[in-house]
Amino acid sequence: MKKTIKLLSVLLLAVFFTTASLSSPAVVKAETGINKITVRGEGAIKVKPDMAYITLGVRTENKDAKQAQKENANKMNQVIAAVKNMGIDEKDIQTSGYSVYPQYDYESKTGERIVGYTVTNTISVTVRDISKVGELLDLAVKEGANLSGGIQFSVSDTEKYYNEALKQAIKNAQGKAAAIGEALGVVIKAPVSVVETSYGGRSVVYADEVSFKTNAVSTPVEIGEMDINAIVEVTYQY
């Protein structure tokens, strides 16, 4: 009779946790007399970005490859000089791409032939004063930039906010474990293991690709907010 009651209890527990939230599952384990509950805790911190990563480029076309390269180099030098004049440190400016490729006339009566060349040169710029983003974009366009890979917003001290998110994740796990313990009529004890399943490091949020228009009065840039998330898996004994 006791074996039957124990079996029914285990089955009821299995049904209870099968119907729990799929996004944040909880697991109850019985191991040689040691009962455990494993829950996932989640934390999120909303932060206003204080820095940005911008990709700028120059594209030139000419029938002569050397001339296309020369024109491109002149314009890119102007763009880089303007970026530096805004106070951007040289270490925050890096070439991210360079290419030269031919243009073909596929409908020529004499067959496929090269009719010109396209040269593209792109740089990645780290902007540590986020208030300068719009001004920098405007100035780059004025000096010849006509390509953009978009903007990525971030925060300089990601670790600080990630640690706060971790604290929230732990509290979230504690709340879940307490709710489950109350439902089962058991006392939740101290955690026996804590596993960080998320990863810290640089967090970024992507803005829409910027369209360069030479007749634009100014480039509006909305910074908004970004989420820094943390996830932990905590096992409690009861």
Image (cartoon, grey):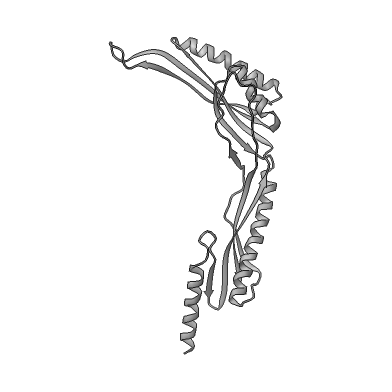
Q: Which sits in the foreground, 119 or 48?
A: 48
* Residue at image coords 54%, 71%: 28
**Residue 112 occupies quadrant:** top left
Q: Left or right? Give the position of 138 relative to 211.
A: right
Q: Left or right? Give the position of 170 relative to 120.
A: right
**Percent of width and height locating residue 25:** 53, 63
* Residue at image coords 28%, 11%: 109
**Residue 235 occupies quadrant:** bottom right
Check the image and report above or below for 39 versus 111: below
* Residue at image coords 64%, 31%: 221
Residue 238: in sight, yes or no? no
Check the image and report above or below for 2 versus 235: below
Where's the C terminus, which quadrant?
bottom right
Check the image and report above or below for 27 versus 144: below
* Residue at image coords 59%, 49%: 199
Labels in figure, total: 0
